[in-house]
Amino acid sequence: MSLTVDGVKYVVDCGYNIPKVYNSLRDQLVDILKGLLKLELKSAGANWDTIRQCICSAYSHQAARVKSLGEYNNLRTGMPCHLHPTSVLYGMEYTPHYIVYHELVFTSKEYMQCVTAVDPKWLAEMGPMFFSLREAGASRKKHADLHQAKMEAEFQLAQEEAAARAATERLRAQSRSASRSQIVTPGGVNSMPRFKTPRRCTNL
């Protein structure tokens, strides 16, 4: 049969032969990767974080943060949603702070199905249009110190540039003043000396 996400969920819930379903689903994924996408097949081995990152990439728009035991709030809408009592995450001693889910089922409560625990950094990395990380504590202080140092460096540079421009203007002003003092104007102080016409001698 053709397997979809809902089909896999149905088989898991009804207790069918899980290994057979897994192998069939894996064969379909291998055909897609090699046949359609022409990608090299690499195994993640025992690194389950790789699998969870893939799921987080697909469902980053349906993420929730823990509120209390078994209760979460959707990160985008704030709507309360709950882990189903049959979920493997429900019975864990440690409740994941952030999860993604496939769908919500509305009964007496809003129950999440197909839930996966994720790292909040993955949400910011794979869903930047929805989420971003806020720095706190030492990281925030370090960021503020770097910003302050940058501002001081820019202010110092601006002062140096202003001083350089002022010095250039002074040199230009002095040069213009020296040029004006060397110009000879008719009748001025620096004009050529005047010669008097000799007086004629008349004999009466």
Image (cartoon, rainbow, N blue to C red):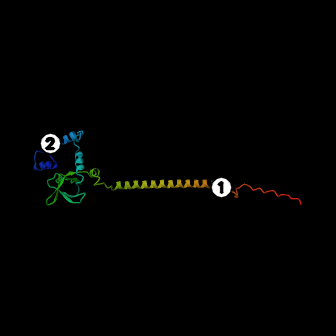
> Mark 2 = which residue?
24
Image position, residue 182 (x, y; %): 66, 53
Disc 2 marks which amino acid? Ser
Confirm or deny contact between disc 1 and disc 2 (CB under 8 A): no
Q: Which of marks 1 and 2 is in front?
A: 1
Residue ID at (48%, 53%): 157
Identified at 10% across, 50% down, the residue is 14
Residue 96 visible in the current orientation: no
- Viewed as shown, does residue 74 lie left or right of 146? left
Q: Nearer the viewer, residue 180 or 202?
A: 202
Q: Residues within 10 Å of mark 1 (few under 14, many from 20)?
A: few
| Residue 95 badge | none
Query: Which structural element holds mark 1?
Result: helix
Of 125 and 188, nearer the camera is: 188
Q: Regarding mark 2 in the picture, which secondary structure is present there?
A: helix
How far apart, in angstroms, are the residues tagged by discs 1 and 2? Answer: 99 Å
Q: Mark 1 points at which residue?
A: 181
Residue name at image x 40 percent, y 55 percent: 147
Residue at the (38%, 56%) spot, across then down: 144
